[in-house]
Image (cartoon, coloured by chain):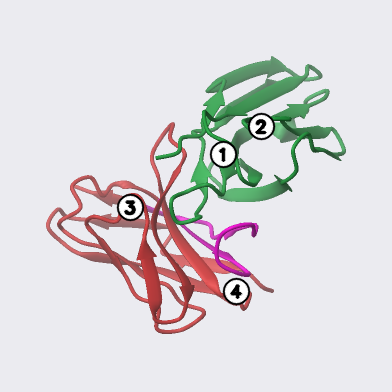
Amino acid sequence: DGGITQSPKYLFRKEGQNVTLSCEQNLNHDAMYWYRQDPGQGLRLIYYSQIVNDFQKGDIAEGYSVSREKKESFPLTVTSAQKNPTAFYLCASSIGGPPGYEQYFGPGTRLTVT
Amino acid sequence: GQQVMQIPQYQHVQEGEDFTTYCNSSTTLSNIQWYKQRPGGHPVFLIQLVKSGEVKKQKRLTFQFGEAKKNSSLHITATQTTDVGTYFCADYGGSQGNLIFGKGTKLSVKP
């Protein structure tokens, strides 16, 4: 059963702590993405990776970091430098890098920082 | 940077009524994609439009790309309760060729 998995579904952290969100895909897709979604907002791109060991900043990369050591995995770390980390985080993948391919999304992780 | 504007933000309809959401840009759109996100769920790809004036249909859903490639629309005929969710348009026009999403139109359907 192919797809994208994100864990955990809900995550709670105290302010000042770094937290890493997991994203794994078994679709054999080259490109992977991280988006942030806030209530009433569209999706905003945090980071994306078109190939292993390479990634680019999106529109709102400040306070976040990523790695792409394996094709199937693209973890996102929300650092203590991110001023408003509470949000719904979505991971996605596509066959190739932009432009032009449909993106497949994982179920998301809802992060709450207090 | 490029912005993709989507209207309306919310739409409440009676089951059986039609529904339309519009996606507009001041610059030429590249490839428009439409996604649907059910409440509590994640976005799911519906369709991609590439050519000027393109029209595509999926059962009760009709997607259009404007002649000048500055707007797109999604029309649902005779809405059903299963159509509930937020519909997003997205354009591959970001500075690095990435997807730029509109803020979405949230559709609610009263049975």
State the separation of the CA atoms marked 4 and 3. 26 Å
Q: Secondary structure at mark 1?
A: loop
Q: What letter labels the chain drawn in green?
A: B
Which of discs 4 and 1 lies nearer the camera? The answer is 4
In the rendered image, which residue does mark 3 sit on?
Answer: A111
Span of residues in magenta: A89-110
Going by the numbered disc 4, the residue's amino acid type is His
Residue at numbered disc 1: B39
Q: Which residue is labeled 4 in the image?
A: A29
Give the CA distance from mark 1 to mark 2: 8 Å
The amino acid at mark 2 is Val
Task: Label 3, secondary structure: give it.
Answer: strand
Q: Are marks 3 and 2 on the same chain?
A: no
Give residue B16's position: percent from left, percent from top.
81, 19
Answer whether residue A96 is magenta in the image.
yes
Q: Position of residue A112 (x, y in %)?
A: 29, 49
Q: Which chain is red?
A: A
